[in-house]
Image (cartoon, rainbow, N blue to C red):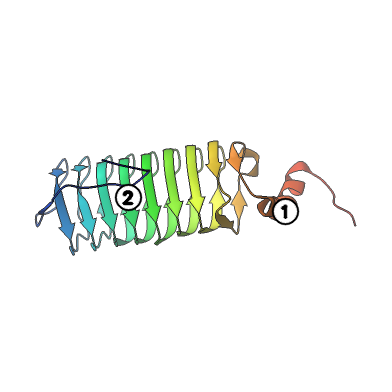
Amino acid sequence: MRSSIGDVRLPDLEPFDGDLEDDAVLDGVELRGRDLTGSSATDARFLETAVVDCVLDDVALDHARFADCVLRDVRSHTLRAVGSTWRDVALSGCRLGAVQLSGAELQRVRVTGGKVDYLNLREARLTDVVLDGCVIGELDLVAASATRVTLLDCRVDRLDVTRATLDAVDLRGADLSGLDGLAHLRGAVISGDQLLGLAPLLAAHLGLRVVG
């Protein structure tokens, strides 16, 4: 069914015109062109489902589970999905403001294009995640666990890895403007140019005086 991370192939889907509800199960359906502002789908399950060209302002998805799903051209000023689970999910072209994914679990997820103002992944668990061509205002990985996470052709205005545990996190494809949690970068991969850019922060962290 899948040839790479986030390459999700869906079967023929049935249109879904109903409302999102807590504990709902959506299986093999497509939500297209819907304004779902203010909906609550806490503890809902989305299985082999596509969400296309939808507005998700102030939608509550706490502890929701997504498996084999596609989200494309989704828009939201605020989206809350605390403690949610995302497995084999592809997101593309999404325009998002503040996204609350603290304590979430992401496995085999690809995010392509789009923009996120604030992506809160505090205490989240990320495994085999790719961010490709994204613009992110703030990427918050405080106390997160990230394994095999790759950033490709991304711009990140501020990255915070304070107390994070990183394993094979490839940052070489990221244009990083600001970085917090320098002491917790162990396990990340950076380029030579990025190392030069981080030199002042490294010197300050080590208490070095650079003279001349």
Q: Amino acid at mark 1?
A: Leu
Which picture quadrant has residue 65?
A: top left
Point out the tag, 1 or 2, that comes first from the N-terminus.
2
Q: Is residue 150 left or right of residue 39?
A: right
Residue for point 72% across, 53% down: 196
Q: Is residue 37 above or below residue 100?
A: below
Q: Quadrant of the N terminus?
A: top left
Q: Residues within 10 Å of mark 2 (few under 14, many from 20)?
A: many
In the image as oriented, which residue stretches furthest toward the front? 3
Q: Position of residue 204 (x, y in %)?
A: 75, 48
Q: What residue do we see at 54% from left, 37% from top?
A: 168
List the residue tagged with mark 2: 90
Between 100 and 125, which is closer to the camera in this rendering? Answer: 125
Indicate left or right for 154 with 27 as reference. Answer: right
- Quadrant in the picture for the C terminus: bottom right
Residue at 79% in and 44% down: 207
Label 1: which residue? 196
- What element does badge 1 sit on? helix
Residue 30 in percent (x, y) is at 16, 54
Relative to 146, residue 80 above or below: below
| Residue 147: image location, x then y, percent | 48, 36
Q: Inspect this view and state whether residue 164 appears.
A: no
SS at mark 2? strand
Q: Nearer the viewer, residue 89 or 124?
A: 89
Type of amino acid at the residue the image marks with label 2: Ala
